[in-house]
Image (spheres, coloured by chain):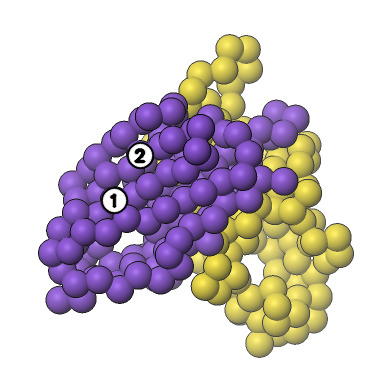
Chain colours: A purple, B yellow
Amino acid sequence: ELKVEQNPLFLSMQEGKNYTIYCNYSTTSDRLYWYRQDPGKSLESLFVLLSNGAVKQEGRLMASLDTKARLSTLHITAAVHDLSATYFCAVVQFPSGTYKYIFGTGTRLKVLA
Amino acid sequence: NAGVMQNPRHLVRRRGQEARLRCSPMKGHSHVYWYRQLPEEGLKFMVYLQKENIIDESGMPKERFSAEFPKEGPSILRIQQVVRGDSAAYFCASSPRTSGRVRFDSYEQYFGPGTRLTVT
């Protein structure tokens, strides 16, 4: 069964600092998503990574995918308070044609002024 | 093009009552997924439906929970005799999933705003 793990679970960082969130998954998958969730809100799609070596960047966030290592990273550059949220990765599982998402445990990021 | 709609957004039920959660997929989407998010946790897959068919219900609790997606109208997640442990956010997602050649975005899921169920 596909398992998705994120670390760290909690991250408190100062504004202006850099940090990386890791997402490991246990079986092969062709695509990986990163989402942001603010408290009490729905999921905001950040990135979809479709192939090995894929790298995408938006503002201070950059995501990459290594399908051989079954690892994705979400790198935060020069963090600002507005990035405080919970970040989830999700991997698509393809059993019998159902494309359900398997979500990681989430990383709760708090950026301190 | 309206996104995925869910209602109600907040639902309060007493133990033993029934909860009905509705999800209207995006226009043109015929596939619906339900996920549950317990407090401080990630989303967990519950069920995947097409119109009038349950495709995968491997994440549904065996008792008290049921889902449907009729030919007309929204998809409904029904929880009978709710207990406090059912308190969670329930998210619906829809995808287009075209037949024939599969395009890379044909099974991308679009999430609704969620229904937050509180059982008192």
Extreme-bottom residue of the structure:
B120
Horizontal and vertical percent position of residue B25: 55, 42
The quarter of the picture where the C terminus of chain B appears is: bottom right
Identify the residue position indicated by label 2 in the image: A64
Q: Secondary structure at mark 1?
A: strand
The image shows residue B103, relative to residue B77, as above or below, that is above
Give me the residue at 75% from left, 84% from top.
Answer: B15
Q: Nearer the viewer, residue A31 or A22?
A: A22
Asked whether the beta carbons under mark 1 and mark 2 sit within 8 Å of each other, the answer is yes
- Residue B80 drawn above or below residue A28: below
Q: Which residue is pictured at 77% across the width and 56% down the height?
A: B60
Between A104 and B89, the one lying in front of the other is A104
* Within-10-Å neighbours for mark 2: few <14, some 14–19, many 20+: many
The amino acid type, in three-letter code, at marker 2 is Ser
| Residue situated furthest right in the rendering | B63
Q: Earlier in the sequence, mark 1 or mark 2?
A: 2
Q: Amino acid at mark 1?
A: His
Residue sitting at x 51%, y 19%:
B103
Relative side of A36 to A57, left or right: right
Vertically, is A6 above or below B30? below
Q: Which residue is mark 1?
A: A75
Chain letter for mark 2, please: A
Please state if B21 lies on the left or on the right of B10 as rendered. right
Residue B61 position, x and y percent, is 80, 61
Q: Nearer the viewer, residue A102 or A66?
A: A66
